[in-house]
Amino acid sequence: MNEQILTAIEQYETIIVHRHVRPDPDAYGSQGGLVAILQESYPEKKVYAVGQEEPTLHYMRRLDVIEDVVYTGALVIVCDTANEERICDRRYSLGDKLIKIDHHPNEDPYGDLLWVDTTASSCSEMIYEFYLKGKDRGLKMNDDAARLLFAGIVGDTGRFLFPSSTEKTFTYAGELIHYNFNRTELFDRMYELDPKIIKLNGYILQNFELQSNGVASVMLTKDLLKEYDARPAEASLLVSTLGDVKGIKAWVFFIEEDDQIRVRLRSKGPIINGVARKFNGGGHPLASGASIYSWDEVEHVLKELAEVCENDSK
């Protein structure tokens, strides 16, 4: 599949790379890293990274603004996006050919070419592997691509603490740090938080609810977010906060937006992406997301999560 993707890239003069809505470092890292590799390798080609920008990720890279006509006869590649409905910028379908590169379970096999590797720690890890397999055919790495891919790997592995971190993950990260970028500065930008978000984190630590079955939950309403002057995307950065709580098996953040309530699910062992799928979502076995449309649905989510945790104990 790597060879087929590279052949497609060689054939097209215009390449447009997308990723998922509400991006995280891996979404920006894999998208931006791939674009940087292709721009370095094929300076004669027109290569773009598109989508709605996320202000908290401006330190990684800024995105391109292009007209619809650019998609005519173009190759479109979507990184780190499991479901077609979550592709950011709906113009992805205007291109000539569509490629999916992802590490989530392949429940929505869209695209003309698909490369899905659920054993990869991140889509950024896959993009680096793509470079390694294609460098004999002309693919080139540069410092910017290395910085973006390293950030994506770090972000999706929780600084290499998550079980998804494999020997390959550490090997690739070890190779990427040989390029010229400031890791200290990158870590600072990735994990620094505005004082108002630190205060919101304090609220979370004081108000989360932990049940005897190991399920914990936090509810962040629009009014509460307004009180802390926090955007839903900023609140989502805090979802790992409860990971150090003794006795916790799985936890969920309910974050209210204008038209829905985002459900951020995390686990220390029980498989939770099945719960996410029941509520308009999906994701990894231990890290998933979903959506509900009323606070009345909260109890249904918690019940499903409780059943998963109880069955995991048997």
Image (cartoon, rainbow, N blue to C red):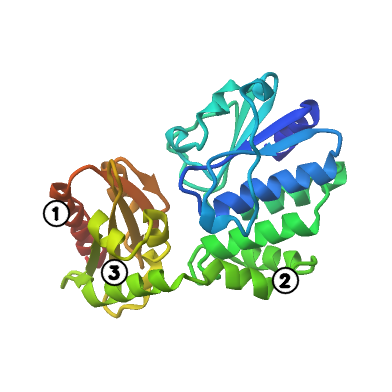
Which is more N-terminal, label 2 or label 1? 2
Marks 1 and 3 in Cβ contact (< 8 Å)? no
234 to the left or right of 294: right
Residue that numbered label 2 is attached to: 182
Kind of residue at badge 3: Lys
**Residue at image point 56% right, 39% down:** 51
Residue that numbered label 1 is attached to: 299
Label 2 – label 3 distance at C-alpha? 36 Å
Foreground residue among 301 and 145: 145
The answer to whether residue 257 shows anywhere in this view is yes
33 to the left or right of 251: right
Q: Is residue 109 above or below residue 246?
A: above
Near mark 1 (Cα within 10 A), the count class, few <14, some 14-19 or many ≥20, is few
**Residue at image point 86% right, 46% down:** 136
Residue 280: % across, % down: 30, 40
Q: Dividing the picture into quarters, in which one does residue 111 lie?
A: top right
Which is more N-terminal, label 3 or label 2? 2
Label 1 – label 3 distance at C-alpha? 17 Å
The answer to whether residue 120 shows anywhere in this view is no
**Residue at image point 56% right, 50% down:** 27
Foreground residue among 3 and 46: 46
**Residue at image point 59% right, 21% down:** 94
Which is more N-terminal, label 3 or label 1? 3
Name the quarter where the N terminus is drawn.
top right
Residue that numbered label 3 is attached to: 249
